Amino acid sequence: MLSGKRILLGVTGSIAAYKSAALVRLLVKAGAEVKVVMTPAAREFITPLTLSTLSKNPVLLDLVKEDSGQWTNHVELGLWADAFVIAPASANTLAKMANGLCDNLLLATYLSARGRVFFAPAMDLDMLKHESTQANIKKLISFGNELIDPADGELASGLSGHGRMAEPEEIITRLESFFSEHQLLKGKKALVTAGPTHEAIDPVRFIGNNSSGKMGFAIAEELARQGAEVNLVCGPTHLHTAEPNIKITNVISADEMHRAALLYFPQADMAVLSAAVADFKPAQKADQKIKKTDAGLTIELIKNPDIAADLGKIKKKGQYIVGFALETENELANAQKKLQAKNFDLIVLNSLNDPGAGFGHDTNQVSLISSTRPVKKLSLRSKKEIAIEIVKALTELHA
Ligand code: CTP
């Protein structure tokens, strides 16, 4: 359940910070991607080196990186995390969170977090019992944050009572049940096409394009993270995925992609067609390597099947298709025309006019267009973030 989930762990100044190391280990073992943000006080209790080594990511410490004049983008971090787990949460940090204070990176990230926030208090029993701490906890719950209740037992002060941070295993169980309840596409089936197609000219040459498949893989992974079973039909790429809910069918040509898509679409609840399918193929593939001649070479091209249009024709009620458009002029009008013509429910308009967008880049600039909702123009973002937005828009169509 935690495989591929992005967990941000916030560590604050409490003796229970030593348990964060075990928590990071368990999260990583469960397949989660883990980043750690620490308050200055937390560094008195556990070193960033321990947590960066275990999480396999640099630990995030300061709003402004020393000497570089650069800031750590807490907004991006807040967007990145599927869940923000603050464990241990000290009385001081709870008080600041409850009142919107923002004097360190952890607090700034908390205020920017879009995913669910969990907090696991750890403190002495009297501090926990105090009216002000209890009021802060109540306030945090009323904001939609989830309390991971402290346990009874021996405390660092030598006293015994309520206040010990929940054990890492219990925190993992809470996260697992949260993610299993909140998968938006549990039980759904999805078809995704991705990558380029190669249209053979002879045994060693082909007509292809520069599509990397990154956008399609990011979409397939996000669909799977939301609980869908994904058939990813993929042209030639070097990409891999470890996501267990994705079954990859590798194809080379548009004809092969067409056959595979027609095979999987009838059982699918949704299809996202991100492949850059070659519109044309050589009328004939030469059996032997074509020899050069002085006369030059003319290759006759014929049309490939239009996978998207064919799926659009057989689409049934309850099935949804997301297509892509790459336009260089009259972008919006052309994309809207394509939405109608291919019977898409949503079209992702790629704009090649923006730097950092399109083939091969890790970022993209797109607009989401449907016939029922206003156009949503997204700023330049990572393909992962765009995949999240596309899947979110798709689940809204389903609702
Ligand atoms: N598509 C497809 N099969 C094809 C061609 C395109 O499934 N043979 C899908 C793509 O995966 C994408 C959408 O259709 O989702 C793009 O439509 P298309 O008309 O090819 O757009 P452009 O490539 O922008 O083509 P045009 O030159 O017609 O504007």
Image (cartoon, rainbow, N blue to C red):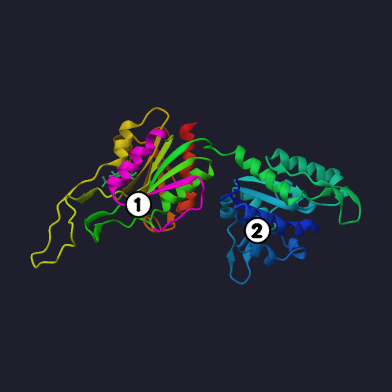
Q: SS at mark 2?
A: strand
Residue 288 on the magenta span? no
Q: Position of residue 332 (x, y in %)?
A: 33, 43
Residue at the right extreme, as displayed: 159
Amino acid type, callout 1: Gly
Residue 243 on the magenta span? yes
Q: Nearer the viewer, residue 27 or 60?
A: 27
Q: Position of residue 147 (x, y in %)?
A: 73, 43
Q: Which residues are magenta?
A: 238-267
Lower sequence index among marks 2 and 1? 2
With 212 as the anchor, is 26 left or right in this view? right
Residue at the bottom extreme, as displayed: 67
Residue at the left extreme, as displayed: 295
Q: Is residue 371 above or below residue 386?
A: above
With 12 as the anchor, is 319 left or right in this view? left
Q: Which mark is residue 36?
A: 2
Amino acid type, callout 2: Val
Quarter assignment of residue 308 = top left
Residue receiving disc 1: 235
Tell me the CA gap for discs 2 and 1: 37 Å
Few, some or many residues within 10 Å of mark 2 (<14, 14–19, 20+): many
Q: SS at mark 1?
A: loop
Q: Is mark 1 within 8 Å of ligand 1?
A: no
Q: Residue at x 58, y 49 (%)?
A: 3
